[in-house]
Amino acid sequence: MTQLRSPQQTSFDPVLLHDRTPHEFSTMTEPYRRELQVHCYRMLGTVQDAEDLVQETLLRAWQRRATYAGRASLRAWLYKIATNLCLDTLKQRKRRTLPIARQPTATLDDPIPPDVNEPIWLEPFPTALLAPEEMMPDARFSLRESISLAFLVLLQQLPPRQRAVLILRDVLDWQASEVAELLELSVPTVKSLLFRARQRQAAQLHDVTVEEVNSAPPDETTRTLLHRYTTAWEKADIDELVALLKEDATFSMPPIPSWYQGRHTIGGLVAKTIFRSNAQGRWRLQPTWANGQFAFGLYRIGEADGAYHAYGIQVVTLEARLIADITTFRIPTLFPTFNLPMTLSG
């Protein structure tokens, strides 16, 4: 099995950085930008904060370049800065999650609650931004687990330091001694944190099923399913949408905090909200990829101009050739991150 490179496996030029020009420094650090962003995303659960932390990481690395003496790889040094910035940030932030992990399932009799616009929701991550190394199988978790929404929900439930150790050891395949040096902890402490993190997640991970990541085009059966799904949305065909769902499928649209489960319940919810009245032509979907899963940019038609405007990033989880979960992140500002236009012509 091909694994992600640990710091000891990474070749690097131990030349000191203090005499580098800004351009030379950028050339040396730029190859690590994407994987650092994925690392910060796993730690924070938000793609926007992850990008900010990467920028801060590279700025601090430049400011502290005189302290880099080549005793550790440049990659390990950057990870140390990024991880500590994430840990400092998490001291001041609420835990990110999804409705399904926050509260019990809602029923059709329950009123739809108002949006919770606090920064407590996970955000989707564009699969296109994964570093090449991130597309390889790794130590304990495959990519389908280590970047999927299901894994991110479980990961965010861990205390920050346990989260960091689990990511570094079980996702990135660092040695305990390397993690101890990065976090300035003893090796026994690292092993203890890892044991507790694994123990805390073991039972939950056993029950989590996620669609296998595949960067290749979907097969004919999957293409047909996705085409039917897109058509069902654009034609507001409730029966067709329900027919594509697993019996116990789940549905949520954060920042609305409620979530729903079951074909009948989801069909009833859609009928009285998303597809209510004359909804044919109200929605348009543009395919993309998020968290290694099939996803769509969801657009809603504007009454004033007839154009379709960015509404949310919709991540679809498949199981056994049916749809197991639909999570629509109503964050239009993420569309440029997914290289999607903000509007489509009518």
Image (cartoon, grey):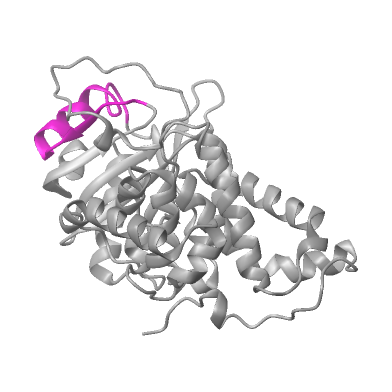
In magenta stretch: residue 290: no
Q: Is residue 224 visible from the viewing direction of this image?
A: yes
Count how many numbered circles sit on residues in the image. 0
Nearer the observer, 335 or 291: 291
Q: Quadrant of the N terminus?
A: bottom left
* Image coords of residue 12 (percent x, y): 68, 80
Residues shaded magenta: 256-279
Q: Is residue 13 left or right of residue 204?
A: right
Dividing the picture into quadrants, the one containing residue 145 is bottom left
Q: Is residue 237 above or below residue 244?
A: above
* Image coords of residue 173 (percent x, y): 43, 72
Q: Measuring 41% from the left and 66% from the top, which residue is drawn there?
A: 169
* Image coords of residue 288 (percent x, y): 45, 55
Q: Is residue 98 left or right of residue 44?
A: left
Dividing the picture into quadrants, the one containing residue 117 is top left
Q: Measuring 31% from the left and 54% from the top, which residue is drawn there?
A: 197
Q: Is residue 293 left or right of residue 13?
A: left
Dividing the picture into quadrants, the one containing residue 335 is top right
Q: Is residue 240 left or right of residue 15?
A: left
Q: Is residue 292 visible from the viewing direction of this image?
A: no
Nearer the observer, 304 or 31: 31
Q: Is residue 2 above or below residue 110?
A: below
* Image coords of residue 101 (percent x, y): 26, 37
In magenta stretch: residue 274: yes
Q: Measuring 32% from the left and 53% from the top, which residue is drawn there?
A: 151
